Amino acid sequence: MTNENKMIIATELQRLAGSGKIKSVKYKYSQVELSARLGISNATVSKMISGQWNTISDAMWRKVQAILKIDIDWNTGDTSNYVKLLELLKASQDRHLTVGISFNAGVGKSHAYVDYERYTGNVIYIECKNYWKTKSYIVNLSKAAGLVAEGTVESMIESFIDHVMGLESPLIIIDQMDKLKDGAFDLFMDMYNDLFRCTGFVVSGVPALKKRIERGAKNDKIGYREVLSRLHGNFLQLDLPDFNDVAAVCMANGLDDADEIERIHNLCEGDLRIVRKEVAKYFLLNGKEVA
């Protein structure tokens, strides 16, 4: 971990929580909330921000970078899906809407969610995992909200709901919701019923999410018909990245060779993850670094 990379991470921490010296500015988190989200001590966060790095291991820096999804070597391209999703997220937050998105992996959904959460106040973003049980889900929701995740599942749920109720126009983004086990999945309706009057919700996943909810509703599985009704029976459709999207990503990262962009577009089959790999490969083979 170079000092240059540490400075990028420290700058992001200061942007999120401040240095503690300016009391009049409202930040996304307090340093206590940010340390809870990161699962590290408040003292460590303070040292990272203030430049007291001697006692902080590279492993700790890498952990913070991973949790905050700080992408040091990659720039965002304004693809059509990216722009559309940012507009949708803002509308959902401002108007307390509930929206379902069920579309292919690799089209930039998660990237847009992460960026929106990073630069917008009162947004809680969580990326679900296959191995999570109900407690893991609630622990990670709590951390994403800057809460200390401790106590029983019931007490953590109540603390989370109380916290969200106190926020101004909050938005909860549940990404890769299709990966949740039934117990955690069922909690959506409990949270929704308590929070829908003051909170926007975006539930997102691959096409399996839509199939799971529709199949559950058809089979009269408890809670699924309610979830489908809250989504008004609809899931937002996105677009497969086209040539212009691929070009936007390539050029944002310093690749402006028209023939190479065309090659990558033909190869990627609408998957921006392949675009990223091919951009990195191009610079590696040409002895350059991604811009």
Image: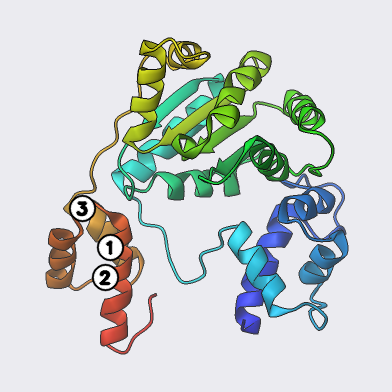
Q: Nearer the viewer, residue 283 or 104?
A: 104
Crowding at dot 1, Cα within 10 Å, few <14 / some 14-19 / many 20+, comes out as many
Q: Which label number is shown at residue 275?
A: 1
* Above or below 284: residue 163: above
Instruction: Please state the horizontal and vertical placement of residue 236, each as a whole percent of the image.
Output: 34, 27
Q: Is residue 183 left or right of residue 230?
A: right
Q: Which residue is mark 3?
A: 244
Mark 2–mark 3 distance (CA, rounded to whole Å): 16 Å
Q: Which structural element holds mark 2?
A: helix
Crowding at dot 3, Cα within 10 Å, few <14 / some 14-19 / many 20+, comes out as some
Pick whichever of labels 3 and 1 is earlier in the sequence.
3
Instruction: Please state the horizontal and vertical placement of residue 147, each as a whole percent of the image.
Output: 78, 42
Q: Which residue is mark 2?
A: 278
Return the residue found at the far bottom: 287
Quadrant location of the C terminus in the rendered image: bottom left
Between marks 2 and 3 in the image, the one whose residue lies nearer the viewer: 2
Residue sitting at x 24%, y 57%: 246
Q: Nearer the viewer, residue 1 or 206?
A: 206
